[in-house]
Image (cartoon, grey):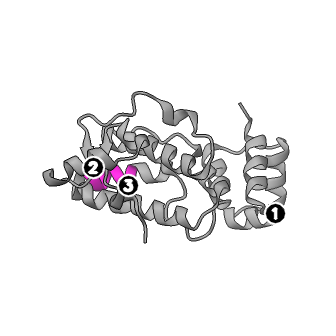
């Protein structure tokens, strides 16, 4: 397991940003970032996450699945599945214009349990779907067998779409009890 300094160096190197640019985006000084990367100063978790998120491309609506998970759970509870799936669409839109390095950062952290099985399963399904599509290694946290929707989540929500969802849902979603049509994953 890499320590914080190694992880920060790795993330910044993968994005190709200078220390100065990452420090500017993260709201810290280049000297402080240098100390974090050298290991002479250890950032707290909030600072660490702020620096990692600063490495993501500007304009990304959801910097990580960790940030997305609570929003999806809340929207599912308050507005339903269709509204929650719109947030997934935003991630897919951002990914269409992103890079493999950005995808690695989006899926790297383990999203905290939301108390909503379908949302927790969705985060694992998205992590696998996005990394497989980019030819990246799926993060180990996404392989957790407890991240399964109980009961199954049919995203379309209309009984007439159930057969299509069962047939078209990608493996990364279906094996976690989430069923979506191919059109639900297409971005225009």
Residue 42: say if magenta.
no
Would you name the residue on which mark 1 appears?
18
Front one among 66 and 15:
15
What residue is drawn where x is 47% and y is 29%?
A: 144
Q: Earlier in the sequence, mark 2 or mark 1?
A: 1
| Badge 1: residue crowd in 10 Å (few <14, some 14–19, many ≥20) | few
Q: Can residue 116 be seen here?
A: no
160 left or right, relative to 96: left
Quadrant the C terminus occupies: bottom left
Separation (CA) of disc 3 from disc 2: 24 Å
Which span of residues is magenta-colored? 70-76
Would you name the residue on which mark 2 appears?
165
What residue is drawn where x is 14% and y is 53%?
A: 160
Q: Secondary structure at mark 1?
A: loop
Would you name the residue on which mark 3 appears?
71
Query: Residue 38: which quarter of the image?
Result: top right
Q: Earlier in the sequence, mark 1 or mark 3?
A: 1
What residue is drawn where x is 47% and y is 60%?
A: 91
């Amino acid at each position: 397991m890499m320590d914080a300094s190694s992880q920060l160096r790795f993330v910044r190197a993968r994005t190709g940003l200078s220390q100065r640019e990452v420090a500017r985006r993260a709201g810290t000084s280049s000297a402080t970032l240098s100390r974090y990367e050298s290991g002479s100063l250890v950032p707290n978790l909030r600072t660490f996450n702020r620096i990692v998120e600063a490495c993501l491309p500007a304009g990304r609506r959801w910097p990580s699945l960790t940030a997305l998970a609570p929003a999806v759970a809340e929207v599912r509870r308050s507005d339903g599945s269709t509204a929650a799936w719109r947030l997934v669409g935003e991630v897919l839109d951002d990914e269409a214009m992103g890079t493999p390095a950005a995808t690695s950062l989006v899926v790297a952290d383990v999203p905290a349990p939301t108390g909503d099985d379908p949302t927790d399963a969705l985060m694992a399904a998205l992590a696998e779907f996005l990394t497989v599509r980019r030819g990246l290694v799926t993060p180990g946290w996404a392989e957790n067998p407890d991240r399964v929707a109980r009961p199954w989540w049919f995203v379309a929500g209309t009984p007439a779409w159930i057969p299509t969802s069962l047939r078209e849902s990608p493996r990364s979603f279906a094996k976690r009890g989430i069923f979506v049509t191919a059109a639900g994953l297409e971005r225009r």
